[in-house]
Amino acid sequence: MWRGFTTMLKRDLVLAMRRRTDILTTLFFFIIVVSLFPLGVGTEKEILRKMAPGVVWIAALLASMLALERLFADDHADGTLEQMLLTPQPVALLVLAKVTAHWLLTGLPLVLIAPLVGLQYHVGGDVTLVMMQTLLIGTPVLSLIGAIGAALTLGLRGGGILISLLILPLYIPVLVYGSGAVAESMAGGGELGAYFQLLSAFLILALVFSPWATAAALKISTE
Amino acid sequence: MTQAPFLEWRRLVVERGERVLFEDLSGRVDAGESLLVEGRNGSGKTTFLRSIAGLYLPLQGEFLWNGENVNDLGEGFRENLLYLGHMNAIKDNLDAVENLRVQSRLSGNPASDEDILSALAAFGLRGFEDFPTRMLSQGQKRRVALARLLLSRAKLWVLDEPFVALDVAAVDHLQSVISAHVEAGGIAILTTHQATQLTDNSTHRLKLG
């Protein structure tokens, strides 16, 4: 059963490596959005430090949104998505493989680039580490929830904007607790454990439900 | 799997948009038979084929594989099914071998590289194995998609316009591949607008519209 998962994961990674621009767009988008704030509101350390948690998380939401539209669109256009639904593999597992590949290519780079943001916003080493941890737990949730939206809007005209309208409200809990955790660590970090437990709970919930919901949505969209 | 497989459909009603394409359609194909689905453009041939594959839900009625509802069988039916639609379902940025390797693994029946190469050679693609398929012509892409037939263990082949874009030699070859599959106890259901040689006793016709 896992052979289906690894085959799909490998296929998507190989395809992405052959069109690297797609990966870089998300990453550069994130860097640019994050860099715009100091230019706009000035470089006063205190203000920047205060804004950092929210800015990082909002930029992460938007960046992950940007790449979502492509998640199933190419496979839909060339017919491989249809074939994916016709294999004896559980569709939810193949969906999970695609989302995993998507996260490795668009979510993980954000985690790795976070220290740069930490420097830009003068937040210090400990807080940067917390920021990376929240992104590590939170960005997979974004990819998993986003997959449902991508599947539902597949083949629709103007699907990109529709995804945003569908999915951004669902991102709110991750935004609240992700940026909340970073802010908490700046304020001393006494309640940090609770934030991480909640974020992890979101991840587990998303892992369990999102692949099934996405698979069901794909079946509707290909009809 | 000792029993000879068969596909049956009962009292199908299929609508597309508001238009009823066909009503109360029942029939069956047995192992060792092929079915040519005929009809003018828009008569519902593709919709019928997609319904078999479960990509389209009929308004009423059901498909039965060996007497069991295909939706209940789920994966048990899909491992017996090979569906080839209008789209070739190959990735442009992968080469022919990579495409077939992925497909055969996902179908639960991984093919060795030797088998893949010989399937490609049988469809006249020797020498084109390691080109990204976006460099191939329409007909060659179709051949890559059709090479799947030779790697599959599926009993039921559902082929939507398989002869499109193929040259004369490839059409002949495909016909012999389909005949061989049927003679070996498989089932083939296909649509085509071309005159075909698949007209022996084992070929049935279904006229839609």
Image: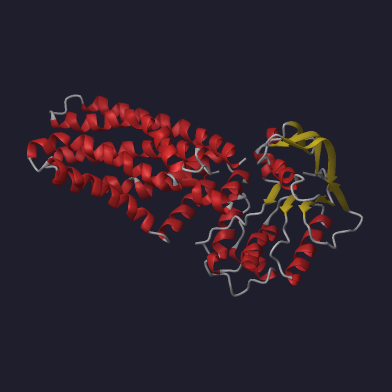
Is any atom of residue A88 visible in this view? no
* Front position in the image: A147 or B40: B40
Residue that sits furthest to the front in the current view: B18
| Residue at the (49%, 46%) spot, across then down | A72
* Residue B109 as seen in the image, left or right of residue B61: left
Measured as percent of width and height from the top left, residue A9 is found at 47, 50
Q: Check the image and tell me how it is coloured.
A: secondary structure
The quarter of the image holding the C terminus of chain B is top right
| Residue at the (50%, 52%) spot, across then down | A74
Is any atom of residue B91 visible in this view? yes
Measured as percent of width and height from the top left, residue A108 is found at 32, 46
Measured as percent of width and height from the top left, residue A41 is found at 13, 40
Measured as percent of width and height from the top left, residue B147 is found at 66, 62
| Residue at the (28%, 52%) spot, across then down | A28
* Residue B54 as seen in the image, left or right of residue A60: right
* Residue B126 as seen in the image, left or right of residue B34: left
Q: Is residue B189 above or below residue B62?
A: below
Residue B43 occupies quadrant: top right
Residue A14 occupies quadrant: bottom left
* Front position in the image: B132 or A163: A163
* Residue A167 as seen in the image, left or right of residue A89: left
* Front position in the image: A124 or A38: A38
The quarter of the image holding the N terminus of chain B is top right
Q: How many marks?
A: 0
Residue that sits furthest to the bottom in the current view: B127
Residue B137 occupies quadrant: bottom right
Residue that sits furthest to the right in the current view: B201
